[in-house]
């Protein structure tokens, strides 16, 4: 099997924004409580933040972290989570049938985000919440002093404003399962008025419109088309979500689901191009709305009674297998990820790189304990699941300029059509004079040869090849065997036209270049 990729330095797809490698944490299960925040434990600091989690998150070098939801946000009153922890009310979280203690809120999150070197991206409640509360949250977070909410932040111990740049106008509002679900027209009106008021408080903020979440919904894309007629002048991004599930379609099809994500992103690009063409005001005719893929991951729904994502259509509640109703931070949605899941996540990351011309924010969902790369236990142990490693390597090496290839070579028949055996993305780091090639070999039985031709570089020298593969695609990492599945570093062929990729493997090939 052989795949040929021809690259020319002059043909650049786009620059990787630091926010492309971001994540998401929600008041759901043990994502916050027992993940970020575990007070009065020897492995936590004086603020109750787990020290092992802080280190692991720092190592990922994330751009932003989206908070506090997710479905949770559509029934969340942010005012319940500020002030003295002793006086904060316990409330019902209808999204996940849990009890929310509110001992962790916006101040706690912003402080934690600063400590791990990440910028917050905050979602406001546009389900059951109102537009004034959304504007007041911006005031609380970003206004310096001299008003009720900014002075209350200071009284609560935070003199300096947080100056949060990125704000999401709700979450998945087109879904029946969302508290406050509404039609596209009603959402557009509410989001427009919220956007106006939020920018009246702080005109420097960037806003994310809540776009179509999932392809099986009857309103898919039509929702985007409808809302952008009103929101185009007011927002900077449109969101979309994408989860890939191994649901019996076969190993090759699951491994090839990078193509489904690519199709999904192309659909959003097309809607944005159409929406732009409708703008009559000259000052908006040249405005480009970017894509915020603010939830993406493999999610096999091991804890939800559901057969496939199509079952979400019309669903209003989730039935979970690992918790009773109205527990505090129950251990739910704690997916156990396999090597196959990790290879698929690596392929999805390649697709994100190949769409950086318009994808400016992408949040792996989620960060801790809930469908996540990092799992913690109650005794102070931390586990890096298999999907941690491709995401870590994408964040480490997937920075620079993505080059646009011409591709030829062997293909395989999949549910997504005939696809290349090898899918790849190449990032050029001009400052370090390095090329980073990400390559997924989807052939389950044979090694593949990768033939890379680079125009515009006088010399390309492969230095190392990081290989993620294994004999058992079902293998996982556990607390007992935390390094059961980890990447291995090898010395590659010095000929970029003859690189070898093991069967069913995800690879990073790092090269020095003379430009």
Image (cartoon, helix red, strand yellow):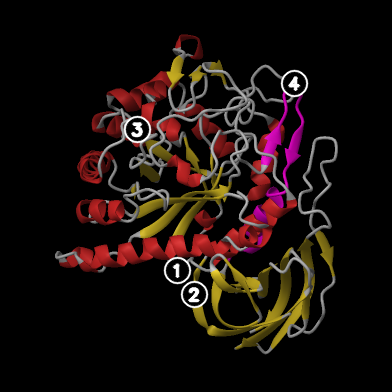
Q: Is residue 25 above or below residue 47?
A: below
Q: Residue 13: which numbered mark, if any?
A: 2
- Quadrant of the rendered structure where residue 57 is? top right
Going from the N terminus, do you reach mark 1 or mark 3 first?
A: 3
Residue shown at 69%/42% (left/top)? 56
User: According to the image, label 1 marks what residue?
Assistant: 357
Distance from label 3 to label 4 (Cα)? 35 Å
| Residue 262 visible, this orientation | yes
Q: Disc 4 vs disc 2: which is toward the camera?
A: 2
Contact? badges 1 and 2 (CB < 8 Å): yes
Q: Position of residue 448 (x, y in %)?
A: 75, 76
Q: Position of residue 432 (x, y in %)?
A: 66, 71
Q: Is residue 329 above or below residue 177?
A: above
Provide the residue span drawn in magenta: 374-399
Going from the N terminus, do you reach mark 2 or mark 3 first?
A: 2
Going from the N terminus, do you reach mark 4 or mark 2 first?
A: 2
Q: Secondary structure at mark 1?
A: loop
Contact? badges 4 and 2 (CB < 8 Å): no
User: According to the image, label 3 marks what residue?
Assistant: 125
397 falls in the magenta region: yes
- Foreground pick, 129 / 427: 129
């Amino acid at each position: 099997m052989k795949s040929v990729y021809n690259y020319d330095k002059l043909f650049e797809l786009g620059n990787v924004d630091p926010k492309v490698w971001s994540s998401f944490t929600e008041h759901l299960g043990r994502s916050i409580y027992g993940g970020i925040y575990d007070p009065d434990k020897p492995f936590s600091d004086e603020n109750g933040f787990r020290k092992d989690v802080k280190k692991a998150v720092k190592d990922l070098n994330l751009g932003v972290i989206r908070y506090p939801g997710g479905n949770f946000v559509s029934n969340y009153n942010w005012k319940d989570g500020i002030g003295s922890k002793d006086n904060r009310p316990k409330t019902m979280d209808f999204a996940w049938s849990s009890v929310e203690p509110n001992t962790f809120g916006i101040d706690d999150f912003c402080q934690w985000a600063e400590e791990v070197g990440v910028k917050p991206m905050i979602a406001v409640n546009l389900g059951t919440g109102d537009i004034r509360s959304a504007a007041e949250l911006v005031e609380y977070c970003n206004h310096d002093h001299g008003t009720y909410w900014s002075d209350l932040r200071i009284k609560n111990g935070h003199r300096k404003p947080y100056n949060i740049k990125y704000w999401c106008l709700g979450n998945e509002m087109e879904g029946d399962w969302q508290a406050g679900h509404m039609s596209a027209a009603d959402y557009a009106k509410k989001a427009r008025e919220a956007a106006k008021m939020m920018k009246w408080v702080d005109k420097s903020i960037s806003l994310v419109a809540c776009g179509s979440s999932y392809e099986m919904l009857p309103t898919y894309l039509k929702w985007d088309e409808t809302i952008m007629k009103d929101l185009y002048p007011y927002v900077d991004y449109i969101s979309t979500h994408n989860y890939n599930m191994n649901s019996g379609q076969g190993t090759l099809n699951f491994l090839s689901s990078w193509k489904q994500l690519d199709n999904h992103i192309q659909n959003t690009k097309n809607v944005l191009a159409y929406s732009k063409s409708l703008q009559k005001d000259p000052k908006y005719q040249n405005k480009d709305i970017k894509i915020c893929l603010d939830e993406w991951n493999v999610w096999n729904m091991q804890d939800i009674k559901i057969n496939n994502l199509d079952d979400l259509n019309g669903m209003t509640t989730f039935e979970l297998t690992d918790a009773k109703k109205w527990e505090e931070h129950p251990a739910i949605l704690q997916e156990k990820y396999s090597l196959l899941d990790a290879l698929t996540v690596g392929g999805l990351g390649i697709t994100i790189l190949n769409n950086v011309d318009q994808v400016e924010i992408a949040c792996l969902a989620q960060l801790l304990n809930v469908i996540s790369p990092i799992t913690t236990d109650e005794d102070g142990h931390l586990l890096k699941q298999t999907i941690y490693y491709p995401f870590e390597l994408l964040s480490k090496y997937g920075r620079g300029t993505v080059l646009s290839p011409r591709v030829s070579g062997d293909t395989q028949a999949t549910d997504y059509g005939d696809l290349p055996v090898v899918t790849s993305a190449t990032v050029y780091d001009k400052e370090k004079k390095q090329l980073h090639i990400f390559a997924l070999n989807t052939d389950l039985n044979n090694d593949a040869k990768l033939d890379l031709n680079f125009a515009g570089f006088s010399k390309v020298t492969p230095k190392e090849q990081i290989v993620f593969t294994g004999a058992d695609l079902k293998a996982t990492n556990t607390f007992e065997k935390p390094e059961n599945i980890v990447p291995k570093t090898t010395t590659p062929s010095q000929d970029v036209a003859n690189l070898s990729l093991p069967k069913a493997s995800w690879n990073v090939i790092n090269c020095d270049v003379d430009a």
